[in-house]
Amino acid sequence: MADMTSTLSGPRGPKPRKVLSRNNIMIYGSLIVVSLYYLLPLWVMVMTSLKGMPEIRMGNIFAPPVEITFEPWVKAWSEACTGLNCDGLSRGFWNSVRITVPSVVVSIAIASVNGYALANWRFRGADVFFTILIFGAFIPYQVMLYPIVILLREMGLYGSLTGLVIVHSVFGMPILTLLFRNYFTSLPEELFKAARVDGAGFWRIYFQIMLPMSLPIFVVAMILQVTGIWNDFLFGVIYTKPDLYPMTVQLNNIVNSVQGVKEYNVNMAATLLTGLVPLAIYFISGKLFVRGIAAGAVKG
Amino acid sequence: MDPSISIKDLHLSFGAVEVINALNLDVGQGEFLVLLGSSGCGKSTLLNCIAGLLDVSDGQIFIQGNNVTWEEPSRRGIGMVFQSYALYPQMTVEGNLSFGLKNAGFSKTEVAERVAKAARILQIEPLLKRKPAALSGGQRQRVAIGRALVRDVDVFLFDEPLSNLDAKLRTDLRAEIKELHQTLRNTMIYVTHDQIEAMTLADRIAIMRGGQILQLASPKEIYNRPNCKYVADFIGSPSMNFLAGALSTEADGTVRFTCPSGVFSLDGYAFDAPVRGGEGWLGIRPEHIASGAEAASRAIQLDATVRLVEPLGSDTLVRVMVADQSFWVRMDGRTEVREGDPLPIGFNPGRCNVFDKTTEARL
């Protein structure tokens, strides 16, 4: 006799999923095509940078190198000439580090306090202040280039790294403040109230309550600033002098030199070297980046 | 004795919106006061004003006789418990409890002593080293209460502390809060929209609407003698049945109530003042309506038809129709009634509440 509790024939349990369904083919197909499209230039760059000039002149740019050489990388880093200096990109690299690190630290420190004050301490005129700040984000940089030259000259900072650090910090302010304000607004307001009842003041709440909860948004801000400042060309070329040119400006001077042979392999290596820092930052903290962007986007 | 908290002529407006309007309130020493109202009535706003988390537009707030209107929240002598617990996520339970004390500059031994005492009272000693994320909802709320407790303050403010908990836990913690109040005898102000919490906890309930207190009285008074139709309607579930009709006074002094369902003599109803007549509301609670054979012993009797039956286990709620008027009736849980059954109902005028039609005030 059949067991009363046994199930009948027919669908039961999890629904089987086809691996090669039409949807999957569409999704993975287009993903593969798009990734190839983006990866191909990188492939060409890496391969070219590992070839010698004779091999490059043979033409087939997609082929892997027959004879791997790291000579172009060494040359790009320490021997390539820009103007009178022939110590390669290394000079620009260290200049960029000396520009990026203080700019990132200063801009994030100020912007996070700004955002915290705007989100939690509704001071008089906060809305006006915020509106002005955001308005700043929509003014094209180019409009302000020359006034800033005069400002820096008057302050005696024109052509120095300090001047450039100040410019970067100021220009990072609108978007970073917006980012931090939105993040702090999304944190529960009752936490802030509880801390006030507990007798914590402006800075204590910031350092002991808010900061420990905001790692994701700090990572987002750091990535935005590091990539933005590292990749900057315009400010670097305008507000510094050849000795202090950041890596991007030096890269341009190496790649765009009009005299002599075009050393494609050295150019490729130099470009890759310049791009390594933002790439590394992104790969190390990419997960936090996505989380922070999502958290900041919830509430505006 | 001085009141523990005294609010004088408080105004609060956000731009053009008046949230609290000329509110006066005195809370006695050791009193448990519940601010009750539907959302948007200003009850949480009032609590935030008392805590000092919102600047008032006008008026004064006194706590223990001190004018604290301009005082920082931490210096008002209050502890506050929030709906979302608001525990600092990166600190342990111990860190949460001691944060306020450290800010106030207490010595290490004093902090440890107070934390240990609060943990003992609330039975959270085994949890002290844990982070809030590793606690259940009930434990978190206990820690939040502990954070107010360690401050050793005169006044506790609760902002809907049980709303985020499930029904069973809510009942347990409600009893715990009541016990806590009986042990500590602090003044407590408790904001809620849950009338059961209000009725069970409060010494006095303040029913709020539109930034004003409509009635401030003991739970019994609020339930039995609501001073206006809104309060009568708000308290009780299901809410009071209302009949619209006309009041008229006979030569012998008895008041008659005339409505489409019939004409009743309100003999036995204690009017606040003699009525001359006019339009009015007659309100009767579902639990004060007798049905079936019992109805015959009541002064006012009606013949009704059952429309809807909602068994709750302990009781059965029945909606009946008398002509076009629907009544909620609370019946014994074992009663067997079905839709369409005829059901005689009856009630006594003494259990009714009569309100003026236009002012909605109690008569």
Image: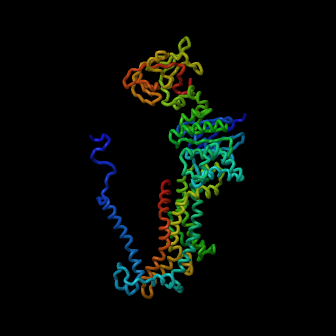
Q: Is B75 positioned to the left or the right of A110 in the image? A: right
**Quadrant in the picture for residue A152:** bottom right
Name above or below for residue B228 compared with residue A264.
above
Pick out the residue farthest to the top.
Answer: B252
User: x%, y% of residue B6?
Assistant: 67, 38
Q: Quadrant of the N terminus of chain A?
A: top left
Q: Is residue A290 above or below residue A58?
A: above
Q: Residue at x 53, y 23 (%)?
A: B353
Residue B17 in percent (x, y) is at 56, 43
Extreme residue in the front direction: A1
Q: Position of residue B83 (x, y in %)?
A: 56, 44
Colour scheme of the rendered structure: rainbow
Image height check: is A111 above or below B346? below
Count of numbered marks: 0
Q: In the image, what residue occupies the spot 59% across and 20% down?
A: B273
Q: Among all residues in the image, which is located at the extreme bottom?
A: A260
* Residue A129 visible in the displayed image: no
Question: In the figure, A105 relative to A44: above or below?
Answer: above
The picture places residue B164, in percent across and down from the top left corner, at 52, 43
Q: Is residue A73 visible?
A: yes
| Of B138 and B308, the residue lying toward us | B138
Q: Is A47 in front, or is B173?
A: B173
B327 left or right of B198 in image = left
What residue do we see at 48% from left, 17% from top? B300
